């Protein structure tokens, strides 16, 4: 037995803690979707039998990479990402989400996941090392890679601050001035305004790369 971490559990397998390798393999073969190929692109071994964990990761890798991405599949993934943005916007009164809002962490995950599938590269290292691998294979421009890494690190740090101050906050900024100022100061900013300005800049830079690589992939 082993535990492998990825974003979602296949919907038809339920949410139980144990899934047989045979059931998993059969699901991927018969029902695995393009969206799940993107979801599983960040799968990591967490605990248990390392040898079996690698077998599972290898199977997931074959599923994720498949035969690359055709135009229709790429367009499906762009639509999938935009649906996540739309769903997040419906809850905007709860505070800006650094994960699902345009330019948030999901854009970063989209870019790295899609480029891995397109280039036949599957990194099982950490996220930042994955972008370096993409740059090494010239799937990701070096300047874009540096901009994305900077934005990712900034937003991950915000995520840690949010969770240290309010476990329920997860990836949403607080809506009250007092709480937002506390986050800003924890991030090293003198005011909530300067903090939000810096965050909006990083998210804009990430979204610009999302638009660029979405076009290159699906065009």
Image (cartoon, grey):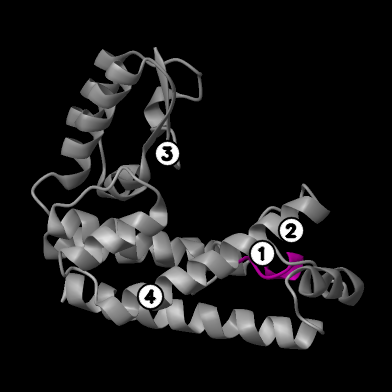
From which residue to which does the magenta span run?
91-98
The residue that disc 2 covers is: 162
In this rendering, the label closer to the viewer, 3 or 2: 2
Q: Are marks 2 and 1 in contact (CB under 8 Å)?
A: yes
Cα distance, mark 2 to mark 4? Answer: 24 Å
- Element marked by disc 1: helix
Q: Dividing the image into 4 quarters, which one contains the C terminus?
A: bottom left
The residue that disc 4 covers is: 146
Cα distance, mark 3 to mark 2? Answer: 22 Å
Residue drawn at 76 percent across, 87 percent down:
193
Q: Is residue 164 left or right of residue 139?
A: right
In this rendering, the label closer to the viewer, 3 or 4: 4
Location of residue 64 (image quadrant): top left
Which label's residue is closer to the chain start, 3 or 4?
3
* Secondary structure predominantly adopted by residues drawn in magenta: loop
Q: Are marks 3 and 4 in contact (CB under 8 Å)?
A: no
The residue that disc 1 covers is: 158
């Amino acid at each position: 037995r082993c535990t492998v971490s990825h974003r979602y559990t296949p919907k038809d397998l339920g949410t139980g803690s144990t899934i047989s390798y045979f059931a998993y393999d059969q699901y991927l073969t018969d029902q695995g979707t393009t969206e799940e190929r993107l979801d599983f692109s960040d799968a990591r071994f967490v605990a248990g039998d390392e040898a079996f964990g690698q077998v599972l990761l290898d199977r997931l890798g074959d599923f994720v990479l498949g035969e690359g991405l055709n135009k229709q599949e790429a367009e499906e993934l762009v639509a999938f990402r935009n649906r996540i943005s739309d769903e997040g916007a419906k809850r905007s009164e709860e505070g800006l989400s650094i994960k699902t809002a345009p330019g948030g962490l999901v854009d970063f995950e989209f870019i790295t996941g899609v480029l891995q599938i397109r280039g036949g590269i599957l990194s099982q290292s950490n996220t930042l090392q994955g972008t370096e691998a993409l740059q090494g294979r010239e799937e990701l421009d070096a300047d874009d890679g540096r901009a994305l890494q900077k934005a990712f690190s900034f937003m991950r740090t915000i995520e840690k601050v949010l969770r240290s101050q309010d476990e329920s906050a997860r990836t949403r900024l607080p809506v009250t001035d007092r709480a937002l100022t506390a986050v800003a100061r924890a991030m090293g900013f003198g005011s909530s305004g300067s903090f939000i300005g810096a965050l909006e800049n990083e998210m804009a830079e990430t979204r610009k790369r999302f638009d660029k690589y979405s076009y290159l992939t699906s065009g």
